[in-house]
Image: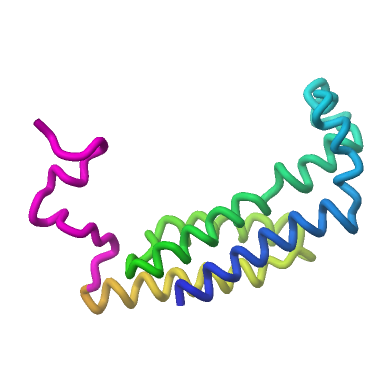
Amino acid sequence: MSKCAGWLLVFLGGAHTLLALTPEGAARHAGEWFSGAPWGDDFSGMSPANSALRLSLEGFGPPLVVAGPLVLWLDRRGITPPLFLAWTLGIWGAVDAIILITTPWPLLLLANILLLVGGRRAIGRGIPRVSHAGAAANPSSSCPGGRRG
């Protein structure tokens, strides 16, 4: 279930970002982005360049492109993604659905359901949600920077 959710997140984030940059034409404003033009804008009088930046690179697509591979990475290692990830993405998707009903929020909802069900099943089967090799035998090995003292 986590694997399907991870791929859905990658697809949603990648598709949103690529579609915003290409067919929507956000990329044509890249010169203005790198000149610093958007930084003088405020939200009430946003320029087309700033709006395009917020739609594409500063939108929800790139974080989903990061979250999806993270879920896949955890799944490959037999680690169940934390439930807070599913709840956070679910709340974000619900707010998005309320504000903009025509977005692909049902796909994000499906990914959230898969993450929640997968997490609950793992808990029910007694599978650890986080499994660090050797962490139980040597708790200090999970500290940042390795072993203590």
Report the predominant secondary structure element of the magenta stretch.
Answer: loop
Relative image position of residue 90 (x, y in whole percent): 54, 61
Residue in the picture at 46% in, 69% down: 115
* Along the viewing direction, whichever of 143 and 52 lies nearer the viewer: 143
User: Picture coordinates of residue 52 (x, y %)?
Assistant: 84, 43
**Residue 129: quadrant of the picture:** bottom left
| Closest to the observer, 36 or 110 | 36
Q: Is residue 70 above or below residue 143?
A: below
- Apparent side of residue 35 relative to residue 141 in the rendered image (left or right): right
**18 lies left or right of 96:** right
Quadrant assignment for the C terminus: top left
- Is 147 colored magenta in this rendering? yes
Q: Residue at x 40, y 69 (%)?
A: 75
Q: Which residues are magenta?
A: 127-149
Residue 56 lies, with reference to residue 123, above or below; the image says above
* Depicted 146 relative to depicted 100: above or below: above
Residue in the image at 37% along x and 59% along y: 82
Count the labels in the image. Answer: 0
Horizontal and vertical percent position of residue 127: 24, 72
* Relative image position of residue 51 (x, y in whole percent): 84, 40
Q: Is residue 132 magenta?
A: yes
Q: How is the image coloured?
A: rainbow
Along the horizontal axis of the image, is 114 left or right of 47? left
Q: Residue at x 66, y 67 (%)?
A: 11
Q: Is residue 25 above or below residue 122?
A: above
